[in-house]
Image (cartoon, grey):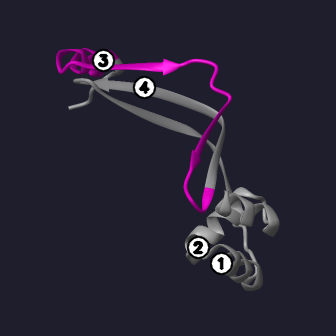
């Protein structure tokens, strides 16, 4: 049985499903710890079904790898030795200090 757009919309209304187009979307960005997905020329629809909001996104996708801050083992070890912090805390302090060892040490000791 073939269903036209009008019948599909009626059926969705009976099931309590509302769908609407979100106008003037320029870009959608999805971030993960390793990468970002940039969806340009995006067409976004919002489906509201019984309180649950679902978004359907269509467009041109560009995948962007994120740079991870890599600190030398010497920098991490120096921060650890000067502060008594764990490796994880030393790396976190270096990240917050944009890789500056002195600022990372001050951050952990003050």
Q: CA distance from mark 4 to mark 2?
A: 47 Å
For the residue pair 106 and 96, the one nearer the viewer reads as 106
Q: Is residue 41 above or below residue 25?
A: below
- Mark nearer the N terminus (3 vs 2): 3
Say if 101 sits above or below 59 in the image.
below
Q: What residue occupies the far front of the structure in this picture?
A: 110
Which is in the foreground here, disc 4 or disc 2?
A: 2
Residue 11, by quadrant, is: top left
Label for residue 12? Answer: none
| CB contact under 8 Å: marks 1 and 2 | yes
Residue bounds of the magenta highlight? 6-35
Question: Which callout, 1 or 3, points to the residue nearer the camera?
Answer: 1
Above-or-below relation of 76 to 95: below
Crowd band around label 3 with a 10 angstrom C-alpha radius: few (<14), some (14–19), many (20+): some
For disc 3, the marked residue is: 9
Residue 18 or 5: which is nearer the viewer?
18
Q: Nearer the viewer, mark 3 or mark 2?
A: 2
Circle nearer the N terminus (1, 4) = 4
> Where in the figure is residue 75, as x and y percent of width and height?
76, 78
Sequence-wise first label, 1 or 2: 1
In space, the residues marked 3 and 4 are separated at their CA atoms by: 14 Å
Q: Label 2, secondary structure: give it.
A: loop
Residue ID at (60%, 76%): 84
Report whether residue 93 is seen: yes
Residue designated by label 1: 80
């Amino acid at each position: 049985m073939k269903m036209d757009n009008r019948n599909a919309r009626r059926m969705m209304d009976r099931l309590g499903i509302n769908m609407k187009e979100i106008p003037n979307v320029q870009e959608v960005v999805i971030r993960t710890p390793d990468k970002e997905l940039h969806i340009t020329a995006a067409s976004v629809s919002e489906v509201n079904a019984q309180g649950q909001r679902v978004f359907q996104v269509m467009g041109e996708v560009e995948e962007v790898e994120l740079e991870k801050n890599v600190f030398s083992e010497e920098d991490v070890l120096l921060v650890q030795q000067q502060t008594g912090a764990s490796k994880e805390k030393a790396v976190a302090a270096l990240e917050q200090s944009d890789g500056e060892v002195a600022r990372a040490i001050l951050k952990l000791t003050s």
